[in-house]
Every structure is written in C-alpha cells, then in structure tokens.
Amino acid sequence: MVIVTGGTGHLGNVLVKKLIDSGERVRVLLLANEPLDSLAGLPVEPVVGDVRDEASLVAAFQGCDYVYHLAGVVSILKEQSEILQEVNVKGTRNVVNACLKAHVRRLVYTSSVHAFAELPLGVLIDERAPISPRQALGEYGKSKAQATVEVLKGTKRGLDAVVVCPAGVIGPYDYRESRMGRFILYLMQASFLGLPDGAYNFVDVRDIADGEMLACRNGKSGEVYILSGERIAFKELLRLTRNLVGRTPSFVRLPMWLCRAGALFGEFSYRLTRKEPLLTQESLDTIVSNCALSSAKAEREIGYRHRPIAETIKDTVAWLGRFRGLSLGTQR
C-alpha cells in the first residue's frame, strides 16, 4: 500500500494515476470535505487527515509501505509566511514523526529547487549546493529548505527517506489551475500581451511524477535529487504557445520597474479579493534569479529523464483547451 499526501493537486493527481498504472494500491490523504474531482473514477482509498495533526497522519499511514509527501502550500506572497511554516515546515515534521511511528518502509519528500541557497547568476546549481533556510530565495523557498532539513534529520533517527527537488512545474492535468496554468491560459487568450524579461527552468509534471517513483525505487536514503527540465525565456514560451493556438506571438516587453509596480498593486488587491496575482515581488525575483539547474545526479543514480519543453507546452495547451472548452484555432 502506498499513501500520497497532496494527491489531488497538479503533481499529486498525475503521480496517483502513474502509481495505479504500475499496479500499486493507493491511499490518498484528504482534508475534511476536500473534493476528489481530479481523481474521479480512480480506484483510490481516501482517508481524512491533516499534516498539521500528527495523530491523524499516524492513523492514515498504518499499513502503508511507502509515503509520498507532496502536500504543501505554494505561495509567492510574503504575508503567507505563517501558513507556510504551519503546513510546509511543521507539517513535514509531523509526517516524519508519523512515518517513524507507523514503521513505513520509505518516505519520498517533494521539496523544491528553491530550497537550495541562492547562487550567483551563471553558477551551476546541483546537489552540492547547500540546503539553506537562511540563504534560500523567498519565504516559500525558506520553508521548503526548513522542511527538507526536517526530513534529513529524520534519516538520522532511522527513517528511510529520499528528497526530490523539482524545478518549475508545468504540464497537463492541471485541474485546480496552478499559477503556471493560469499563465499559459493568459498567453493563449489575451488580446494584449505584456511580458517582463525573464526565464526559468520548467519541467513536465509527468516527468516529475516518474522521478518520484524512480527515487522511491532507486534513490539512496538521505540523498537529495534535483528534477529539472529546460530553461526557457518567457518570450519563447509565448511564441510556442501563440503558434499552437493560431495567434500572433507579438508582445510588449515590460520594464522591470513597471512589473514591480504592478506586482505591488496585485499584492494589495489580494488583501481585498483573496485572488492571488500572477506576479508578485517574489515571483519577479525568481524569474531573474539563477536557474542553471543540473539533474545529472538524478539521471545517473535513479534513471531520471525529462522530455523537451516544446512537447510539454504542446500537450499543456491541448489539455487546457479541452478542459476549458476553448477553440484553439489552426496550429502554425
């Protein structure tokens, strides 16, 4: 038996499907009244629990051989630091304790490349870079670094655990519309396109799910594995996306000072509407940060591979079009 926390999310639902296809019996940890829409029709065993409640985790993990811990808060808003601590850090500490108490065989923890210390532009980031709660970029990165430290401390207490650190997640089956899903929709539909200069390393959600399973099967306890993809500039992401929907790829390049002003307005608006903006100060910091990531260790030690980013974008646009009932026009 395998249990997945965060199994209804973007990465979670893809991982659950792959685990079932591989013949695993899968249990999914759900919050009370959490919908199972992204897992509709799948033979999963739902169990109610909360990573903030260790006792509920111990009960949920009973009889499970493997735990995939994906549940967490993804935020680029500084004011959400408290919930990041509660869920990402303390929640992961509870998962570690529950794994030890329930005698699970292995924990696979999904961290983030943002858990690594921020390195200067041009310096290759691999697993030799320190996991640093102090030097990680942004509140989210700091929380994932702290959570990763909790897992590695757990291995010193006898827990068999491996950590995977995905780059930016992108791909189909994004039922809850992640921030990148919303951004791709913006590129597909907007009449006026304004973009900042910037780029990031994105990886297909399906390749991350494969990497999770490979880490469980082949990873060494106490080791960290970067699951990265390809670096792509936003202007190239725009070109690929607009060509797929038969629209002009032209855009206006927005200066960073204007983007930061818009991000401040978006963060202020969030306090009134509770709708997260596409751009915040932290997201802008991210797209101009060092994203020279290496997945060589994961490729060498667990057999990880990633597909071309152009294939991912094509599949994402097609899936979003079907999910939203959009007319995509003629591919160029």
Image: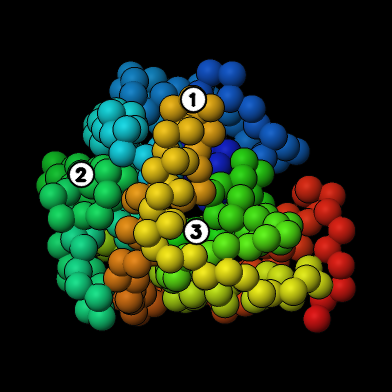
Q: Amino acid at mark 2?
A: Gln
200 relative to 8 in the view: left or right: left
Asked which secondary structure carries label 1, the reply is helix
* Residue type beneath disc 1: Leu
Residue 109 placement (x, y as % from top left): 35, 48
Label 1: which residue? Answer: 272
Q: Amino acid at mark 3?
A: Val
Q: Residue at x 15, y 55 (%)?
A: 135
Percent x, y of residue 140: 31, 45
In the image, which disc is placed on residue 146? Answer: 2
**Mark 2 or mark 3, earlier in chain:** 2
Residue 246 in view: yes
Q: Circle 3 sits on which residue? A: 169
Which quadrant holds residue 40?
A: top right
Residue 289 is tagged as none
Q: Nearer the viewer, mark 2 or mark 1?
A: 1
Q: Earlier in the sequence, mark 2 or mark 1?
A: 2
- C-alpha separation, residue under disc 3 versus residue under disc 1: 28 Å
